[in-house]
Amino acid sequence: MYAFYRATVDVIIASRIALFLSAAFFILGVFIPSPALHPFFMVGGLLAFYFAVMYIQLPGFVNAVPARWATWLLLALFLIGLAASYQYGYLPFLPFSLFYALLSARRLTRQPTYYPNAITIAGLLLLPLSPTHIAAVASFPLASVYTLLYRIDSSRARLPLSFKKVLAVTASYLASWLLLVVGQLWALLIPSLVLTASAPPKPRDTYGVGSLLFRWLIALAPLHHHLMYMAFVVIMSALCAPYFPPSILYREMPNYKYELLTMALIAYIARALEIVALAALAVAALVLYVAVRLFLSKPVPLKPP
């Protein structure tokens, strides 16, 4: 029992490190206009954020907690890949991607709960193959979003998790990534259509509105590649930021309403209109607002067995 507790604590700590790193990278990326450093920080921040968000949930996704050595090895491989990506592109993430995919593949086809992991695994394997920053954004981060949307919207629509639907979403996602790599940004529309048919969103609350908007805002990437990245701000404001950082930091969830989604939409619209300063300020305000609300919320102690 104590070994299980310690392994769980290590998962939480590793996710916290990635979450704090993500916040730092986002702030640096917003305020550093360097053509080389800006994409490094912004894509690195996105990768670190989804590492934190997905790893904290991995025990639930595979019905097992990774051994302590596995958690720290995975984090080390991620940090090495992240540091090396500035100079060598995304190939240095190969050991991280392979190891994380191996952890995520446990009993992949045994029960419906495990099926959606196939989408995440596809994104992990595409990360080291990414020839550009845009391709990297469309790898593990985008696959993580599709995985979560499929899980959550299937549940909200009271639809069972289906292996055939997961395969359809995964295949459409892989096809869109390959087309995106050769410059066809319109291809992001394909998984949006397949995902919506497989797990239709229910826009009855902030999450539902964000889930619906993300599928079509990301498909506007052909208008400007930054709109693909800014679409992540929308879904992060509706799903990831409200629900996952509190669980990573073991604090009560703040009572958000529509303020996060509103700031995200301001950032998206401002970037679409080329009002870059306003978009940057809206993103920075969103990150800082979430941080302040989180640290003003009540801590929840993690009691040992």
Image (cartoon, rainbow, N blue to C red):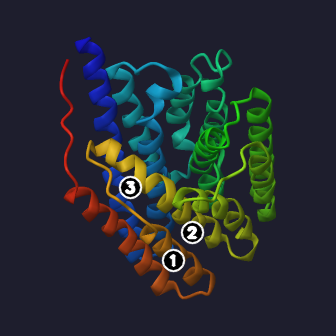
The residues tagged by marks 2 and 1 sit, at their Cα atoms, a distance apart of 7 Å
Comparing labels 3 and 1, the label whose residue is closer to the camera:
1
Residue 205 visible, this angle: yes
Packing grade of label 2 (10 A; few <14, some 14-19, many >=20) is many
| Amino acid on which the number 3 mark rests in the picture | Ser
Q: Residue at x 75, y 54 (%)?
A: 192
| Occupied quadrant, residue 260 | bottom left
Direction top: furthest residue: 1
Q: Which residue is mark 1?
A: 267
| Amino acid on which the number 1 mark rests in the picture | Ala
Of callouts 3 and 1, the N-terminal one: 3
| Occupied quadrant, residue 291 | bottom left
Q: Residue at x 22, y 55 (%)?
A: 297
Of callouts 3 and 2, the N-terminal one: 3
Say whether marks 3 and 2 touch (CB < 8 Å): no
The one of 207 and 289 positioned closer to us in this rendering: 207
On screen, residue 5 above or below 283: above
Q: Which residue is mark 2?
A: 230
Mark 2 residue element = helix
Q: How many marks?
A: 3
Mark 3 residue element = helix
Comparing labels 3 and 2, the label whose residue is closer to the camera:
2
Packing grade of label 3 (10 A; few <14, some 14-19, many >=20) is many
Q: Quadrant of the N terminus?
A: top left
The one of 38 and 215 positioned closer to us in this rendering: 215
Q: Quadrant of the C terminus?
A: top left
The residues tagged by marks 3 and 2 sit, at their Cα atoms, a distance apart of 16 Å
Q: Residue at x 68, y 67 (%)?
A: 217
Q: Residue at x 54, y 56 (%)?
A: 207
Q: Which residue is mark 3?
A: 22
The one of 130 and 292 positioned closer to us in this rendering: 292
